Amino acid sequence: MGFFLGKKNAGKGTYSSLLREIFGTDKIATVALGDLVREIHANWDDYKTTDEYQNLKKFYRGYISFDEAVERLHGRSQSTLLPTEFVLALLKTRIAKVGKKAIFLDGLPRDIDQISYSLFFRDLANYRDDPDFFMMIDIPMSVIDERIKYRVVCPNCNNSRNIKLLITKRIEYDESSKSFHLLCDNPNHGDIMMVRKEGDDLGIKPIRERLEKDEEILRKVFEEIHGVPKIMLRNHVPAAEADKYFDRYELTPEYVLSWDEKKKKVEVEEKPWTVKDDNGVESYSLLAPPVAVTLIKQLSKVLNLL
Ligand SMILES: [Zn+2]
């Protein structure tokens, strides 16, 4: 059981799905609190008929009544507003449903006072024989900022790409607005133009407080918690040291798009992309695969697979 720590948009979802691809969905499951809450909220009538719901009712104990906690889940509430006791019961019931797999949890701890719950959550969820550990993603604010600012989403399948950092195979140019549009790569539907979400142009501004809280939790666990193994994943590498440890193709490039009027074709130029990390050091951001390799190396050490 691994607890994912790191800022929102740090890539927890990406690394989880890479792990599932490598080890198989029969061996690995990811439980993300935010997704879980959204899923239950959207399918409430069906959910109420399941054993999982009965278990949730059985497991829950806390300062507000079960019905009130459910009401909060349905309210415009994000998972942040749910009481910790309810969050623990939600995660426990979902883990019981997932069964005996390695589980990666995203969403606990969400706050400083939830750190100590995560220390005992393995026992709470009846996972006492399996090792547990923290997985921490160290990523600069500036990388997340650019990921949000240039993010585009498919309105049909929700696939997410980035017009600057993660493009699709086919790109269209709109001559009237002089803008470029990515077409979603999903083979399950026809050509669909990916669009920007409202507010994304603000980057991390609206979520800065959340990001700082996430970082504070990570630092606290990293520096102060003993007895639980820790895996540290670094998203970035100082530009001055990059050549020593990484190949060019392992670093996130920047794509510069231009319109070739003669050929009537979108030209894509790839160039190195650097940002300042949180300490002002010029850095490259690593692509997901090299980070996943260090994750697997550390994981096998933590799980005594070596
Ligand atoms: Zn799509």
Image (cartoon, rainbow, N blue to C red):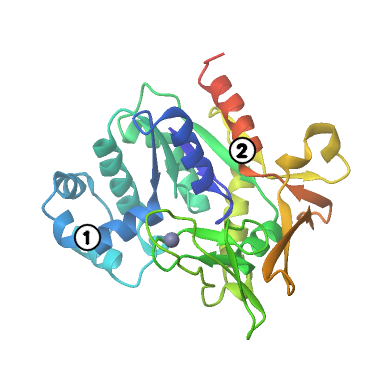
Asked if residue 64 shows in the view, the reply is no
> Does mark 2 have its CB less than 8 Å from ligand 1?
no
Residue at left 73%, top 45%?
A: 251
Is 36 located above or below residue 162 in the figure? above
Is disc 2 placed on a helix, strand or loop?
A: helix
Query: What crowding class fits label 1: few (fewer than 14 Cα within 10 Å), some (14-19), or many (20 or more)?
Result: few
- Where is residue 82? Give x, y as percent: 35, 60
What is the CA distance from the residue labelled 1 to the residue labelled 2? 34 Å
Please identify the residue farthest to the bottom as the structure is shown.
176
Please identify the residue farthest to the left as the structure is shown.
49
Residue in front for this viewpoint, 154 or 32: 154
* Left or right of residue 180, residue 91 in this image: left
Residue in front for this viewpoint, 86 or 268: 268
Please identify the residue farthest to the right as the structure is shown.
240
Asked if residue 83 shows in the view, the reply is yes
Residue in front for this viewpoint, 282 or 261: 261
Query: Mark 1 is on which residue type?
Result: Asn
Going from the N terminus, do you reach mark 1 or mark 2 first?
1
Residue behind mark 1: 43
Residue in front for this viewpoint, 169 or 304: 169
Tag shown at residue 289: 2
Q: Quadrant of residue 225?
A: top right
- Where is residue 226? Give x, y as percent: 58, 30
* Left or right of residue 263, residue 83 in this image: left
Q: Quadrant of the C terminus?
A: top right
Splitting the image into four quadrants, where does ligand 1 fall?
bottom left
Residue at left 34%, top 51%?
A: 87
- Where is residue 55? Give x, y as percent: 18, 44
Residue at left 27%, top 67%?
A: 74
Number of marks in the image?
Answer: 2
Q: Quadrant of residue 23?
A: top left
